[in-house]
Image (spheres, grey):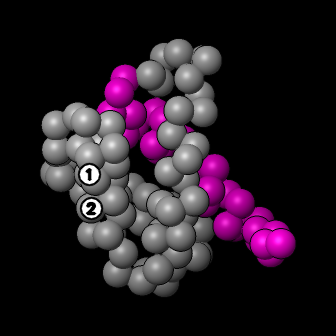
Amino acid sequence: MGQALTEKENELYKRIDEVTHYIWDPIGVNGCPGARDEYYSYLPKIFELAQKENSESEIAEYLNYVQSERMGLKSDIKRCKEIASIIIDWSENLGILGS
């Protein structure tokens, strides 16, 4: 059985969920209430990476992999780097990563 998340970790997980759904959203479902869970399966890996120092490029690579290999969409590493930066900013702002 896994360990419960701290309040800050829980907040980061929620923020990553919002970033992936409302900002990254490679398949364009953020306006569909029934698709709110579309990216849930990717959250644990992104969350894991967001807690590691110097992981921004790993997050970008993972998002790009998901987008291009898992979803069959066009690769867009530049956009994925922008999203990774937002996620790392959240991690730092919540005090999970040092600034």
Instruction: Check disc 2 and report the residue beneath it.
Output: 61
Amino acid on which the number 1 mark rests in the picture: Asn
Q: Residues within 10 Å of mark 1 (few under 14, many from 20)?
A: many
Asked which quadrant contains residue 23, the reply is top left
Name the residue rendered at 25%, 57% in the picture.
81
Instruction: Check disc 1 and report the residue beneath it.
Output: 64
Asked if the residue under mark 1 is in contact with the one under mark 2, i.e. CB atoms within 8 Å, the reply is: yes
Where 64 falls versus 24 (above or below)? below
Where 65 falls versus 96 (above or below)? above
Q: Residues within 10 Å of mark 2 (few under 14, many from 20)?
A: some
| Badge 2 element | helix
**Magenta segment, prevailing SS (helix, strand or loop):** helix
Q: Is residue 50 magenta?
A: no
Q: Is residue 5 magenta?
A: yes
Residue 83 x %, y %:
33, 51
Q: What is the spatial separation of the Cα atoms under label 2 and label 1, in whole angstroms?
A: 5 Å
Q: Which residues are magenta?
A: 1-28
